[in-house]
Structure formats: structure tokens, C-alpha cells
Amino acid sequence: MFEDQNIEILDSHHHFWDLDKNYYPFLCNKIDPDFFLGNYEMIRKNYLPFDYERDSINHKVIGTIHCEAEWDRNDQVGETKWIEKLAKRNKYPNAIIGHAWFHTKNAETIIAEQASFDMVKSIRSKPNVKFAKNSIDYSHDGSMQDINWRNGLKLLEKYNLNYDLRVPTWHLEEAVEIVRLIPNTKVIINHCGFPWDRSFDGMEFWRKGIKALSLEPNTFIKLSEFGVKGEEWNFKENASIIYELIDFFGPKRCMFASNFPVSKLKITFDNLFNNYKKIVEKFSKIEKKYLFSETAIEAYNLNKSLLNTN
């Protein structure tokens, strides 16, 4: 572990929020009882660069990518403006994953405005999805089957932006179809495709979808958010998932991420990255370099000169 302790980390997915100044419905309004990790009261407080630096102090974080955090959707670019100002006064973040609805009439206007910020490298736009695997009804508007949503998605290539794909397991196979619509756009799958159901059948179902996505050459995956509602962080199960994903995608398309402060509901930053390091301790130096930093740097087209390499 000593050799790995100072390995450079590019945290490819985390969030900042200031609840005193900004409005995030899920953090400011009534608690959502269906939140995927259960009760999240403990993260309904400010989380800023100072807090992140304190959490990550024992690891060599050279840079981070901020992912949109459910900011007020009536002001989609507002979060980007706030994060950019925050970045100018702090070491982190070094890049931004912004938000834009794809199915609305102003989709291109918002995407173009997001792309006008040098820090914005990708867009995360969560499609409407089924509440559960066996649900029948869900809104077609804004779903991956919505032609307007698909047309908005295709605009990302025009503006040289990646797509951060976040859908539950039961939409992974469907996502293959939309990934093929944008072969020249990098698609980064968030949070391992959410293998929440750890039963044999549940993992087989997840495996079928995630393997199909891995066969598309423009896909990458974030090895992040292994939390399961009502359960503790399980080292053995999560290590197995990480090994499978590295087998499917290869180290050059896999990137570790913290998803802090959300993952704090299940694990500390120290324990999370120490677990990551332990899981891949027998990998080669170059493989570790890709998993912890190079894949994210290359996938998001980051300028290495902007990173904190001290």
C-alpha cells in the first residue's frame, strides 16, 4: 500500500453546494423517501472546496471534475457560473459537467451557453426513467425514446461535449441504442450502472446491460457510488464489481471517482480510496495510473497544466 498511497488522483465525479446561497430542490425541500441511498439528512448541509480538501487530505488529489448537483432547473446555467467563480478562488474543481435538458425547445440555447465555458467538458441530462424494473408507466417526454430528447442529445457533438449517462440498471440495454446515435461523442456511464440488486439474478441482469454498453467503443465508465440502500459498503462485493468492469472496459476506459459528499452516507473518503487502492494493488503501475487519473484526464480533455501537481 505504501507505493500506492501517493498515486495521483483525478476525482472524476463529485459535487459542491452552498445551501445558504443557492437552491437545490432535493437538498432544500422535503426529504425524498425514494432516494437511492435512503435517508440523506446528513448531507443536507454546505459542502465546499474546504470540506473536500479536508476529506481528501490523506490522498494526492491533483484535480477534480464537478458534476451538476440537481441545481434549480429553472436556471440551468446558474450552477456553472457559480462553480466557475468557486474554481477561481480554490484548487478545485478543474472541470465541470453541466446540465441541459435535451427535450425542451431551448435545449440548443442552453447547451451552447454551457459550451461557452472553458471548464464545461460534458453534459449530464437524466432521461425520464421507470421508477423500478417492473414499472409499466413512465413519462415518454424526456425519455430516451423521445425524438426531441434524442435530437437534443445529438447536439453534443456540435458543441464538442461529452455525455454523462446516468440511468438505473433496467435502462442499460436501452441506453445502448442511444449511445449508437452519437458514435463520435464520448459517453461516460455514471456510477457503474447502479448494481443495486446484489442477488444472483440481479447481478446477471446488471451484467447483461453493462457488458452490452462496454462493447460500444465510445463508452467509458466511472467506478463510483457502490452504496446500496439499507446496507453497509461491502468490500468483497464491490471489489468483484470493479474487477468485472475493468475486464469489460479495460483500464483505459475506467475511472475511479468519489461521488462525494453523497458517498459519505456510506463511507469516508479515506476508506473509499484506500479500498480502491487495495482492490487494484496487484495491477501494473500504468494500469493504476489510468484508473486513478489518466482515463479521466483523457476522456474529459483536461489540460494537465491546470492540474495541481504539487
Image: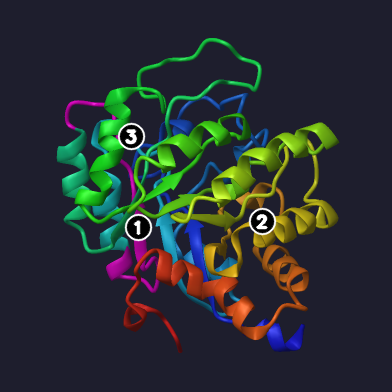
Question: Position of 246 compared to 303: left or right?
Answer: right
Instruction: Depth check: give the residue in front, 180 or 102.
Output: 180
- Inspect the image, locate mark 3, and give the three-letter code of the amino acid beneath it: Asp
Residue 172 appears in which quarter of the rendering?
top right
Q: Can residue 197 be seen in this view?
A: no
What residue sits 41% from the left and 42% below the top? 180
User: What are the residue bounds of the magenta stretch?
Assistant: 87-106
Task: Identify the mark nearer the N-term, 1 or 2.
Answer: 1
Neighbour tally class for label 3: few under 14, some 14-19, many 20 plus, Cα within 10 Å: some
Question: Position of 209 compared to 148: left or right?
Answer: right
What residue sits 21% from the left and 34% below the top? 107
Inspect the magenta stretch and tell me whether residue 109 lies in it: no
Residue carrying label 2: 245
What residue sits 44% from the left and 86% below the top? 309
Classify mark 2: helix, strand or loop: helix
How many dots with numbers?
A: 3
Residue carrying label 1: 96
**In this view, 165 is above or below 93:** above
Q: Is residue 309 visible?
A: yes
Instruction: Residue 113 in the image: state x and y as whole percent.
Output: 16, 48
Task: Identify the mark nearer the N-term, 2 or 3.
Answer: 3
Q: Which of marks 1 and 3 is in front?
A: 1
Instruction: Depth check: give the residue in front, 233 or 144.
Output: 144
